[in-house]
Image (spheres, grey):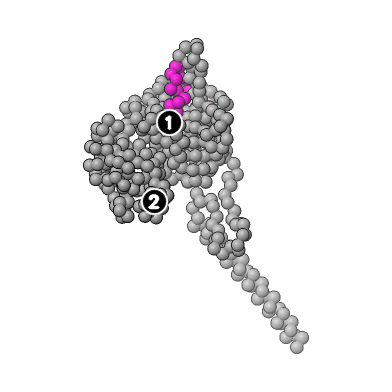
Amino acid sequence: MKKIGIAIAASLVLNAAFTLFLFNSLKTSMLESSSEQASPNVHLASYDYGTAPINEKPTSNFYIPEDFVETANIVTQAVVNINVTGRNASEPSSGGSGVIVSQDGYIITNNHVIEGGGKVEVSLNNKRIYRASVVGKDPYTDLALLKIDATGLKPLVYANSDNVQVGQWVLAVGNPFNLTSTVTAGIVSAKGRDINILQGLYTIESFIQTDAVVNPGNSGGALVNMRGELVGINAAIMSETGAYEGYSFAIPSNLVQKIMLDLKEFGSAQRAILGVRIKDVDNEIAADFNLGNVEGVLVRTVDAGSGAEEAGLEMNDIIIGVNGVKTASVPELQEQIARFRPGDTVALDIIRNGKRIKKSNIVLRSMSGED
């Protein structure tokens, strides 16, 4: 009996050890499989809220970058300091930042940085100073294009700003208070912001909002993702004191790229319009039209002779997309249309009388009404 008891005990120990081995092997295999399948760009671990006890804090390990050194090294080489000397002794000097967008010396900045006129000088990260010429400027988007006589520069690569997500890390790089090559970090706080700072009927405000620190002098500088790609040009802050208070705004890179190409080719922005008067869908409009979501753009009127009229758009149509890109608000719709030139065609996703339809081959016109 004693021998039998010893045998049983030994068997139990071996079974327990074998079970533990199988569990650890299965766990390792699952972790390796998960690691192989995960995208290297996905940094957030998933968390099953459905199985979590009530009021329990999620224990997922959210991605926090160790540092921003590599990204900062890329971007600081492409961000310049801009100094604008007044036309005469009585006019003060002004300045800001700019971003190199070509190897042969094209630099994008804000229109308000250089709109006062006078001599424009550009200081590169290596402290070389160049006299810059103004290729063109566009007050409707607050962008301007400069050119310096230089080659072999290191421009930034454009990111697709449509893919920018609220909550993703970004860096702002510029020259606040003339402190060159200043790098700050934050996240994207919102998209499609209209803060009503640009004046005029055809201005475009569809800003990327971020909490990266931006101050006077950062205007025209770069907002970049963690790969060092340009997602926007820093343009404004919202502040009651004139200093940073947690709200800064950048012009999306897709719009920047289009305006830059226009200014380079024509010296001015080639602005296309749809030919409608619009407003945001609010809760009341959504209820009146039995919409499932409080989003989209209501067509209030259609201009006679416009591309919209010729394509059959009607008053009370709800525009919800341009070429497959969702447009939940007026700023988002205006930004999408502003990426095209007069004569280009677009397709609109529309809700009419409760049904979703598509209007294709809508020819955009210029602000003067011509193709």
Residue nearest the observer in this picture, 8 or 144: 144
Element class at badge 1: loop
* Residue drawn 39% across the image and 51% down it: 286
User: Mark 1: few, some, or many residues within 10 Å (few <14, many ≥20)?
Assistant: some
Query: Residue type at mark 1?
Result: Leu
Placement of the C terminus among the 4 image quadrants: top left
| Side of 287 where 75 appears, left or right | right
Return the residue at label 1: 198
Element class at badge 2: helix
| Side of 140 where 75 appears, left or right | right
Q: Earlier in the sequence, mark 1 or mark 2?
A: 1
Return the residue at label 2: 286
In the rendered image, the vertical position of residue 21 relative to residue 80, given as above or below: below
Q: Position of residue 304 (x, y in %)?
A: 24, 37
* Residue drawn 43% across the image and 38% down it: 206
Query: Residue type at mark 2?
Result: Ala
Residue nearest the observer in this picture, 256 or 241: 241
Q: Which range of residues does the magenta coloring cover?
A: 107-125
Residue 119 is inside the magenta segment: yes
In the rendered image, the vertical position of residue 191 relative to residue 236, given as above or below: below
Q: Position of residue 84 (x, y in %)?
A: 48, 19
Residue 199 is inside the magenta segment: no
